[in-house]
Image (cartoon, helix red, strand yellow):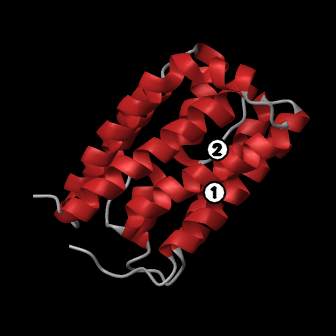
Amino acid sequence: MLSLPKIAAIISGSFFIAIAINFFLMPLKVLDGGLIGIALILNYLFKIKVGLVMLLMSIPIFILIWRHHHKTIYASIIGLLFSSYLIDLLEPYQYYFLYYIEWTPITRSILGGALIGLGLGIMLKYDCSTGGLDLLAHYVSRFVPINIGLMIFIMDGIVVSLGALLLPDDTFILSLLTVTAGGVATGLCTMNMPEHS
């Protein structure tokens, strides 16, 4: 059974991620890294739902990690289902936000990345995640002495670099700002991470 703090982390983290993707990144066609970045690329190219892609692409990672961390898996499956649902639920409202709130693309990219990093960091701090590469990074961090935020930042950089082949130059730069802000926010949230049940 999930503890109350873990449930609160899943709900708040999922909201931050869904808001960041729909209201900050997608209207500008900016990428994040990891599975979110891959899902955004597929959305921009083929209009496939971001939450659905995240859900489907996380399945192999859950299978890989299943044997080692049942406790983390259960909470992360709930985190993945809730965040994927919220991302797709909020998608129709993204252009209202873009229309009524006037921020520069740079500001949107940095705030979007920071909100995603905050959402992931909150969830990782309570031993849950949205699945995907952040779950993989959380698993690997138990064996390699590298901060989870730094590990996610490296993975995100790889995804955005590959996505650069499909994006205009300015969008690539905005995506780098997003990934950097996200890596910093996740790193700050997971610094000296205590163990939670």
Report x, y in % for residue 155: 60, 57
At x 44%, y 42%, the residue is 15
If you read the primary sequence from the N terminus, does the residue marked by circle 1 or circle 2 appear first?
A: 2
Q: Are marks 1 and 2 in contact (CB under 8 Å)?
A: yes
* Quarter of the figure that contains the C terminus: bottom left
Q: Residue furthest right?
A: 169
Mark 1 lies on a secondary structure that is helix
Considering depth in this image, is 111 or 65 the residue closer to the camera?
A: 111
One can see residue 81 in this view: yes
Q: Position of residue 111 (x, y in %)?
A: 69, 49
Taking depth in this image into account, of 27 and 48 the one nearest to the observer is 27
**Farthest residue, direction left:** 1
Judged left or right of residue 93, residue 169 is: right
> Residue 7 is drawn in which quadrant?
bottom left
Residue furthest out toward the front = 100
Q: Is residue 64 above or below residue 168?
A: below
Q: Which residue is mark 2?
A: 32
Which residue is tagged 1?
182
| Label 2 Cα neighbours within 10 Å, binned few <14 / some 14-19 / many ≥20 | many
Q: Nearer the viewer, mark 1 or mark 2?
A: 1
Disc 1/disc 2 C-alpha distance (Å): 8 Å
Mark 1: which amino acid? Gly
